[in-house]
Amino acid sequence: MLENVIDKFINELVLNNENESLVGMEFKTKSRHKRYYVYTNDNRNIMTKPVDGQKQFSQPIPVIKRYLETGMINTDNDSSYIIPIGDYIKTKYLNKVSNSDLIEIKIGKFITEHLDNIIKYCHINESEIAKLKDINYSGKIFDIAYSFMSNISDITEEKNKRYWKSEYLLNNSKVRFCSQFGSSKIRNEGKTISQEQGEYFYQYLSERSLLAEKYKNKNIKFIVGSENINTNVSFINTKISGIKNIILYGPPGVGKTHNYQRIISEIESDIPQNKIFQNIKENEKIILGSEAFQKIKDEGRVEFVTFHQSYSYEDFIEGFRPTEDGSIKLEDGIFKEMVEAAKSNLEKNYYLVIDEINRGNISKIFGELITLIEEDKRDVYEVTLPYSKEKFKIPSNLYIIATMNSTDKSIATIDIALRRRFTFLKMKPNIDLILDERAKELFTYLNVFIKDTLGEDYMLGHSYFMKINSKDDLEFVKEYKIRPLLEEYFYADDENFEKANSILEQV
């Protein structure tokens, strides 16, 4: 169908070529304020040529087709001329613009909805920061009289009212964004200033794949009006500046694996990071499979992996793998796949959960990427991967949440590279999560003894006792859960094992 539609457009160009002394149909690039002609040559290629220049460009039909299908272009390779051409085709031949596709929105609201996406884009493309702080670039791209982004230190008292008071942390500098968009004054082609500036901003977002999904392929009416976001209290965007690497550690049964779901759900709910950490330390009961977490899981934004002694760089990053025909093939590991997914969707956070992280050889598994996972190295530093020779960065919207059993290896003796790059949250047994009174009594006596003989890292977690509702349940847990663990704890220490076993028998 799209091929037929594009053919109709080419035929229209042919007719215009025959009737015009110049070439083709006149279009206008929104971001550059230039006019250009679109025409077709003898091979029926779609060509563009600026009015004030001699250079011509060929616009590949597959690229136009992709834009018609997805509303997206590749800013590294595609010409921005594709967008007005595609929009013309959609309007005339595909009837994409209908009442159901019409969205009316204040231009200020539209802009503020996309500020997080722009911040994330700037983290990955640092050169864009200087451009957005340049008043000439901002005027050219957005048709505004102020720089779109400004360091707080550069905003004078006179300019203060021209910028939203919301503060964002970008490359260790606090910045604010210009709020001076929109006017009901009629300007070019009968459009209001709000409409023109909104269209410029829309094109800027589209060219960089930053446009929110709900606005793609929609006809938008931009009206005058701004958004007073956090006008009384400024803030730092914790999604961007926050801690990205977290390890939950503690003895068996304290809920480490279960609590990663709580961390993810609370990050997605914009709960402040210090509050999230406090919630985890308090280790209250959580309900698994919550609606928020399930939505993230369904969207494929969380993956789970367990480290072990045989796990390698080739499993985690990339490596050659045998195929059915006996050859070998370079395949991406789970970490590289998650990184690429996060890069392709900067609007969302992605989460890689690593269970038993201390059981793997960290240097062997992460290799040269151990440096890149640091929060201040994200989006900035890059390395060349040894197998594929690709340039590789880690984006800021990827969280690494790991668990560690403190009985396997002391926190003091784990890989120093791991300690430096992760924030550790210690989880302790919580007696309040145990309902049965006899189970509580056994839990208390055993943990006092274990703490005195082996240390706090070996205490029994509450999860062993949470499902005990009867004497039979308790006896089952004692025989098949607790006693084998005590035998492991006190291996070759018969005296202390007998003491622990006597506690087990007496309660």
Image (tube, rainbow, N blue to C red):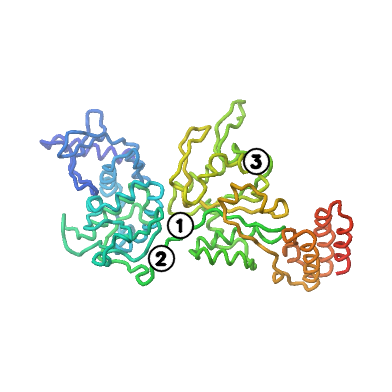
Horizontally, residue 332 falls left or right of residue 432, namely: left
Q: Quadrant of residue 424?
A: bottom right
Please, what is the three-letter code of the amino acid marked with disc 1?
Ser
Quarter the C terminus occupies: bottom right
Looking at the image, is mark 2 or mark 3 earlier in the sequence?
2
Q: Which residue in the structure is indicated by mark 3? A: 311
Instruction: Say left or right for 285 vs 56.
Output: right
Q: Is residue 167 left or right of residue 137?
A: right
Numbered disc 1: secondary structure? helix
Pointer 2 local density, CA inside 10 Å: few below 14, some 14–19, many at least 20: some
| Image marks 2 and 1: residues in contact by CB distance under 8 Å | no
Q: Residue at x 53, y 51 (%)?
A: 300
Place of residue 259 in the rendered image (x, y in percent of width and height, measured from the top left): 62, 60
Taking 300 as reference, is 258 left or right? right
Q: Label 3 sits on what residue type?
A: Tyr
Across and down, in percent, residue 29 comes to 22, 46
Question: If you read the primary sequence from the N terminus, does the residue marked by circle 2 or circle 1 appear first?
Answer: 2
List the residue tagged with mark 1.
241
Q: Position of residue 117 (x, y in %)?
A: 39, 54
